Image (spheres, helix red, strand yellow):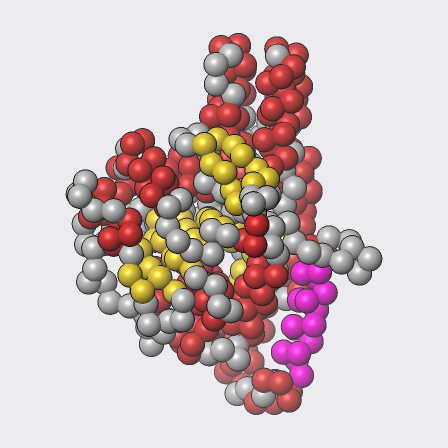
Amino acid sequence: MDYFRICFFCGIIKIMILSEKSYRKIIPVAGGKGGVGKSIFTVNLGLYLGRLGKRVILIDLDMGAANLHTCLGLKNTRPGLGNFVSNRELSLADIMYRTDYPNLFFIPGDVLAPGMADIVYNQKRNIISQMLKLEADYILLDLGAGSHFNVIDFFLVSNSGILVVTPQVPSLLNVYGFLKNLNFRFLQRALTGKKTVEECIRSHAREARPNTRFRMSRVLHEIEKLDRDSGRTARGYLKSLKPSLVVNMAFTPEDLKPVDNLRQLVRDGLNVDLACLGMVCADNEIDKAMKKLMPLALESPQSMAARQIERIAEKIFQSDNFPDMPLDFSEYKDSFELAAIEADNDWACMREPAATGGAEGRNPADMEAIIVAQQRKIQELQQTVRMLTLGAPKTGAG
Ligand SMILES: Nc1ncnc2c1ncn2[C@@H]1O[C@H](COP(=O)(O)OP(=O)(O)O)[C@@H](O)[C@H]1O
Ligand SMILES: [Mg+2]
């Protein structure tokens, strides 16, 4: 079996990511920031991949704030990861159960038995090694907010991580900070053994303060000067990282612009190439579904947000070697251009009265709310553009 392409240390364990036919593809979902829609997205992505006939396991790894069961519309009555870490007798397979949704399995978080927030190295290693034994096509990890090592180490279990970002400045800055920490964590774990190289990475990680014009290429250059092999390894490892973005809570197709600026900054500053899986609009149907404790994909499958998440699921489904996407480069320059075209079409459809009831179908109060929201959006966008064109983001990461 021609089975692995990438082989790297996630810092805890040597991982071989199987690429053939997406077999047991692990997709961690993070975003640096809380409240950007990671859990809603993960649940609905899982539902759609399950409907496409794939065996999917959702794991709630938001330590201390697990709520994936709520987004799934499930009662929180079963043991989860909190029980797993406090009871050596349990295996991950023991706490996993089949949901009523097609092909969808669930491993709850630490709601019934807290303790995941203080998880130690060996417990983390145990979760990862057992995760790699689970039978599935896709294992989706719903990660918590922040750039703590616990979040980053689970993100690095795979090179196929997804970052959910909103077009607002705080979210963009958090993603930048997350990726910067990710780079250093990755290199620190990958390049062990050479004291001078280790010290070089450590000192840069400390120095990478806000307001500095940080360049990962300088760090790589220094590593190379200290030890050529380590330099080559470092470049290879960073190249293997292929995080993708999902732009959530978008109000207009133009919301892709600040995210595209972020991509440039990440490419220039951090030597990481971000892809874009698509945009998901800000949609009231999500809150309506939440209030009914129902997943969006079931409660409102015709809503624009549901259709956009479904399209992202199809992209992943069709990519045998996800995160590499089978893009036709004669048609699109890259994944961002495809996302922009899709967004233009989506918003054009939304404006079509026949498609959704359109503006004529809305009452004046709704219209006023939309106008106020869009005015606020324009101000936020102006602020975002100002921030991103002023230079490196002011992030506390590093
Ligand atoms: N596309 C969207 N449109 C409107 N509201 C959204 C959207 N995505 C998420 N939300 C809302 O944002 C809130 C936070 O979502 P959640 O998935 O729990 O965030 P996170 O997991 O990143 O903390 C929820 O109340 C949800 O209803
Ligand atoms: Mg969450």
Q: Is residue 361 left or right of residue 135?
A: right
Q: Quadrant of the N terminus?
A: top right
What segment is highlighted magenta in the picture? 338-352
Pinpoint residue 119: horizontal percent, then vertical percent: 27, 37
Whole-percent x, y for residue 252 in the image = 63, 66
Q: Nearer the viewer, residue 374 or 154?
A: 154
The answer to whether residue 258 of the structure is visible from this angle is no
Front-lying residue, 90 or 84 = 90
Say left or right for 349 vs 280.
Answer: right
* Residue lying at the far front of the rendered structure: 1
Q: Residue 125: which quarter of the image?
A: top left
Residue 304, relative to residue 267: is it above or below?
below
Residue 11 drawn above or below residue 294: above
Q: Is residue 277 left or right of residue 45?
A: right
Q: Which picture quadrant has residue 388? A: top right
Residue at 58% x, 65% y: name it: 314
Residue 193 seen by the camera: yes
Looking at the image, residue 258 lies above or below residue 88: below
Image point (60%, 25%), residue name? 234
Left or right of 273: which side holds 64?
A: left
Residue 231's spot in the image, x, y percent?
63, 20
Instruction: Give the dominant element type of the magenta stretch: helix, strand or loop.
Output: helix
Viewer-nearest residue: 333 or 21: 21
Identity of the residue drawn at 49% across and 10% down: 195
Residue 208 in the image, given as x and y percentages of width and height? 54, 26
Q: Is residue 5 magenta?
A: no
